[in-house]
Image (spheres, rainbow, N blue to C red):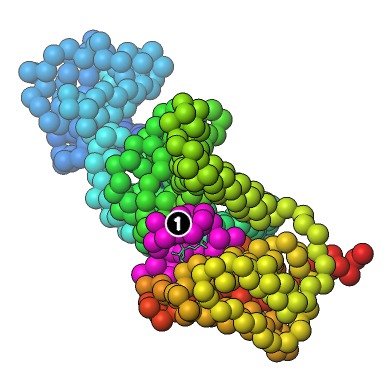
Amino acid sequence: MKKKIFGSIMLIATTVLIASFVIIIGYLYTYFSSAEKQHIKDELNLACSAVELNGIDYLEKVESHRYRLTWIDAEGLVLYDSVADAKELENHADRAEFIEAMAYGEGESSRYSSTLLEKQMYVARRLKDGSVLRISIGVATVGHLVLGMLQPFVTVLAVALLLSLLFANYLSKRIVEPLNKLDLDSPLENEGYDEIAPLLVRLNQQRLKIDAQMRNLRRHADEFRQITASMREGLVLMDTRGTILSINPAAQRLFRADEDCVGEDFLTVDRDPGIIAIVKEALATGHGEMRAERSGQVYQFDVSRIESEGEPIGAVLIAFDITETERAERHRREFTANVSHELKTPLQGIIGSAELIERDMVRPEDMQRFVGHIRNEAQRMVTLIGDVIRLSQLEEGADMPVEPIDLFSLVKEVARDLEDLAQERGVDVAVKGESVTINGVRLLLYEAVSNLIDNAIKYNVEKGSVRVKVTSDNDEAKIVVRDTGTGIASEHLSRIFERFYRVDRSHSKASGGTGLGLSIVKHAVQYHGGKVDIESEPDHGTEITLIFPLTNHLDHIVAGR
Ligand code: ADP
């Protein structure tokens, strides 16, 4: 803008100067021409009077370097010329000023020299004797005048241009300065030119609009950040070239990156060609997905294309931690395989024995043993199926009858029911403690305690003992089952609550175990909001403690009745 103002001022100054020069030259020329003409007319009048008085004598005495005097007779013959030899001059009868003077008494004309820079002005007058006296003078042409004025003009032009330059510089600065100082953040508070007031009002409106839009955008961005920050899933937004636009904290943890990776290529946070391939696939087809492991966890990566007005503008990657689902799926598969296997073994035993009996291949004295075997195997299947049903009930959180249960009485009841087994194995079972009541499911608690005491008898030694104690404090009730049996090596301790996990497979099977007992114990205790502790020392014995909170989530069921 400053340049434009400066240029305009300079252009105007130059144009004005040149125009002034042309006009002045025009006026000067007209003025000087008419003054000159008047002057030579006066000179001619004097000369005419003198010639009429003294004839050629006067002319020969006149000494003039400026004027040229020519005396011509009525025929045009030059009688005298102050510059050239009259005899050598041609006839002047055809000269315009001569013809005019002959006709009207006075005549004038002017002729340019070949260079056009000089002009000869002629004024002629007829004398009384009919001859014509002509005076001529070289006068400056416009060109001559221009050339003559050139130096002062250039000087004036230079001075004027210099002044204009300074003035233009000063003026353009003064005009632009207030504009540069405009406070665009509060346009209406500016004082300056009234002419730009409408512009400032418009600017203010635009600013308010932009402010509102910015606030809106910021709010959306904040909302987006808050939502994505609290997401458990990793979320990465990318443009079509794979540059990261946004990455939430879950994704930062997953890819071991930080906020600084925004603006970087996704390759810098994860070099897995699989993920790069699904991003490309999503950009091309709309969707891509894969499963992969990161830091020991299994993730499902889903990538979807983002479009705007039908054009792909980027992709969003969501990473779900599916470790638990995967584990649950694997457990379910293993569980099904285990149950099938566990059922198949006794069934094969039953079928084998039945076939032998059917073909009369069993001696009568062995018949009893075979039938007993069939009965035992069938019993094992029933127990297994019962355990499987119980486990699935527990896992599905099925509704079971809740009632106040005195744990001490329940434990004594279990011990009584297992008395025969204990006697059979030569194990001494003793229960002591105090009465403590919690709200719970009788069947589950019975099975949990029964499984524990059953194991304590089964995995005990000849003449071993089982000590069961029921205690309570302000918050908890505890059932401790301690035996003097085989104990469990520490490497198995963390796994014995898994379904079908057995430390000694043959011992477990021989004693009718299904491998589901402790799993049921754990789930049953958890169902009551409690937990299980275990301590064991191989060859010395095992102590398993069930801890129940005195108040649990089942209380409201009982209270609501
Ligand atoms: P099982 O039907 O085989 O008894 P459990 O789930 O009850 O299945 O127990 C899992 C395994 O833990 C058993 O196979 C056994 O090896 C071990 N175990 C459980 N209780 C005891 C115990 N009191 N003493 C020693 N080992 C035990």
Residue neighbourhood size for the residue with mark 1, other residues' Cα within 10 Å, grouped as few (<14), some (14–19), many (≥20): few
Query: In this orientation, does residue 463 appear?
Result: yes
| Residue 421 lies in quadrant | bottom right
| Residue 129 lies in quadrant | top left
Front residue (pair 444, 122): 444
Indicate if the residue with disc 1 has its beta carbon within 8 Å of ligand 1. no
Residue at horizontal 38%, vertical 46%?
292
Relative horizontal placement of residue 305, taking residue 558 as reference (left or right): left
Within the magenta stretch, is there residue 124?
no
Relative horizontal placement of residue 42, taking residue 376 as reference (left or right): left
Query: In this orientation, does residue 18 appear?
Result: no
Residue at horizontal 8%, vertical 24%?
85
The amino acid type found where label 1 is placed reads Ala
- Could you tell me residue 347's position as x and y percent? 50, 38
Q: Which residue is mark 1?
A: 510
Q: Is residue 303 above or below residue 505?
A: above
Q: Which residues, given as a range, are shown in magenta?
A: 491-520
Residue at horizontal 17%, vertical 12%?
91
Residue at horizontal 12%, vertical 31%?
83
Secondary structure beneath dot 1 equals helix
Q: Is residue 455 above or below residue 470?
A: above
- Could you tell me residue 88's position as x and y percent? 7, 18
Q: Is residue 254 above or below residue 406?
A: above
Front residue (pair 55, 314): 314
- Could you tell me residue 359's position as x and y percent? 46, 26
Within the magenta stretch, is there residue 505?
yes
Furthest-front residue in view? 365
Furthest-bottom residue in view? 473
- Could you tell me residue 236's position as x and y percent? 46, 50
| Residue 133 lies in quadrant | top left
